């Protein structure tokens, strides 16, 4: 069963700690893959890693509580199969940004990721996402259109430490969507906070 954001939030709230922690671990793993940051994070103790995860969870939870982060879940009988996270902006001309679709390993291969994607696309008027260029055909089959290559924010805009994570990505969007969307990226201040943990 896929729970979309217009449904009662108590189900999402039940799974929220698991979802936010899982996403925070994914973000830290992505940071670890960046040559300029890997050495800093590789030396982290277990306590520092847990503190970094809690810090990223705090950022995500703040976005969720402010209404900027929406979550759809696939679940049944108290089991979380997977989730989709997307960011919304109060400005209605901005499309929604699909940050992540994640299906837990035991439940993969049953179409749950596609079901979550379809639910998010059906729910929102306009959705965009970033993906590697080799995934363009997959998202086109789902009904999305290639909108161009993503231009990460500059170092001068405060993204010197994370902009390379977003280089060479394609922008996919729902038909008819144009313009900006609220892409979620940790900025340099966020990364510096993680490095001094």
Image: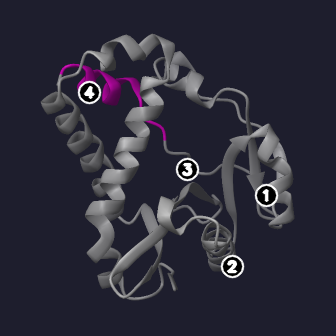
Label 2 sits on a secondary structure element that is: helix
Quadrant of res 152: top right
Disc number for residue 182: 3
Residue found at the very far left of the displayed protein: 47
CA distance for labels 4 and 3: 22 Å
Disc number for residue 97: none
Looking at the rendering, the stretch of residues picked out in magenta corresponds to 185-196
CA distance for labels 4 and 1: 33 Å
Is 82 in the magenta?
Answer: no
Which residue is located at x 45 percent, y 23 percent? 158
Residue highlighted by disc 1:
139
Callout 4 crowding tier (Cα within 10 Å): few <14, some 14–19, many ≥20? some
Residue highlighted by disc 2:
122
Closer-to-camera residue (158/195): 195
For marks 4 and 2 on the same chain, the one whose residue lies earlier in the sequence: 2
User: Residue 142's spot in the image, x, y percent?
Assistant: 80, 66
Is 193 in the magenta?
Answer: yes
């Amino acid at each position: 069963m896929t729970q979309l954001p217009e449904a009662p939030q108590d189900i999402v709230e039940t799974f929220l700690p698991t979802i936010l922690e899982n996403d925070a671990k994914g973000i830290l793993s992505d940071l670890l893959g960046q040559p300029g940051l890997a050495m800093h994070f590789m030396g982290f103790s277990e306590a520092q890693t847990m503190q970094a995860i809690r810090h990223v969870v705090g950022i995500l939870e703040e976005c969720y509580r402010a209404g900027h982060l929406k979550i759809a879940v696939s679940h049944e009988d108290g089991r979380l199969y997977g989730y989709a996270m997307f960011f919304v902006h109060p400005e209605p001309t901005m499309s929604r940004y699909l940050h992540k679709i994640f299906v837990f390993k035991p439940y993969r291969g049953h179409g749950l990721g596609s079901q979550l994607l379809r639910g998010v696309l059906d729910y929102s008027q306009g959705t965009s996402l970033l993906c590697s260029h080799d995934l363009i055909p997959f998202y086109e089959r789902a009904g999305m259109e290639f909108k161009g290559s993503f231009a990460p924010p500059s170092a001068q805009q405060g993204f010197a430490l994370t902009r390379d994570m977003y280089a060479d990505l394609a922008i996919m969007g729902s038909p008819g969507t144009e313009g900006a969307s609220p892409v979620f990226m940790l900025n340099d201040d966020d990364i510096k906070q993680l490095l001094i943990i």
